[in-house]
Amino acid sequence: LNQASLLQRAQVIRSWSLLFQRDHKRRVQWEARAVMEYLEFQKYDDIQTKALAERTKGERFAIDAEYVFARLARLREYTQLLSDLRPIDRVKFRSDPKLYGLAQWYLQQAVELLFGTGAYLVMALALPKPEAYHDILDAIGKHGIIDKQLAYRLEHLANLRNLLAYDREQTDIDEVYTSVQTRVGDLLAFADQIERFIGADATA
């Protein structure tokens, strides 16, 4: 089940209990997390519905450039806030809950904008519908919206995003610190490449 899609996991849990697990507490925790991951992913249906509605307005697939640019502007705001935390050394970061909490929040918001924008483009361009967060970046990477290597580097944020969203106490401080140090540039590159793609598409 660890390799199954979010929908498949949720369906299994709704249909019957897992037959065997030595540690009952761990089974319950796993089931709870699987359900939460699915419910969290469902919220992108609203974004996808918006994209689908725009797509059906005309013969060509429609992208609301203003909507996407507004999301990218917010993404840049959060990446700037994350950049402001980068000069802080690891020891101070680990010892100050306020710094760590801010980093978690900024990172979560940036990642939400990352995947939400990607999900919108997937539907606007009629790309294969994703079943999990990492599928979103894979789809837009294969379509040439963003560089495939960039998509690959950002995919690991899907797992971190799930922890930040509803299991924050389980996040690793060092992983958050490393993400702040290494992923800000990738988040900005995502915004740049999306803007270039939409600009080129608008003039095509």
Image (spheres, grey):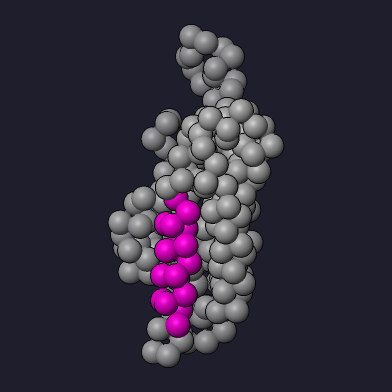
Indicate the quadrant containing the C terminus: top left, top right, bottom left or bottom right: bottom left
Residue 33 visible in rendering: no
Residue drawn at (39%, 35%) of the image: 3
Residue drawn at (42%, 63%) of the image: 189
| Residue 146 on image: x %, y % | 37, 66
| Residue 141 on image: x %, y % | 35, 62
| Main SS class of the magenta portion in the image | helix
**Closest to the observer, 73 or 158:** 73
**In the image, residue 22 lies in the stretch drawn in magenta:** no
Residue drawn at (57%, 74%) of the image: 69
**Closest to the observer, 24 or 136:** 136
Boundaries of the magenta span: 183-199
Indicate the quadrant containing the N terminus: top left, top right, bottom left or bottom right: top left
Looking at the image, residue 14 lies above or below residue 25:
below
**Residue furthest bottom in the image:** 203
**Closest to the observer, 198 or 28:** 198
Looking at the image, residue 150 lies above or below residue 194:
above
| Residue 120 on image: x %, y % | 53, 66
Residue 144 visible in rendering: yes
**Closest to the observer, 112 or 176:** 176
| Residue 203 on image: x %, y % | 42, 90
Residue drawn at (56%, 64%) of the image: 76
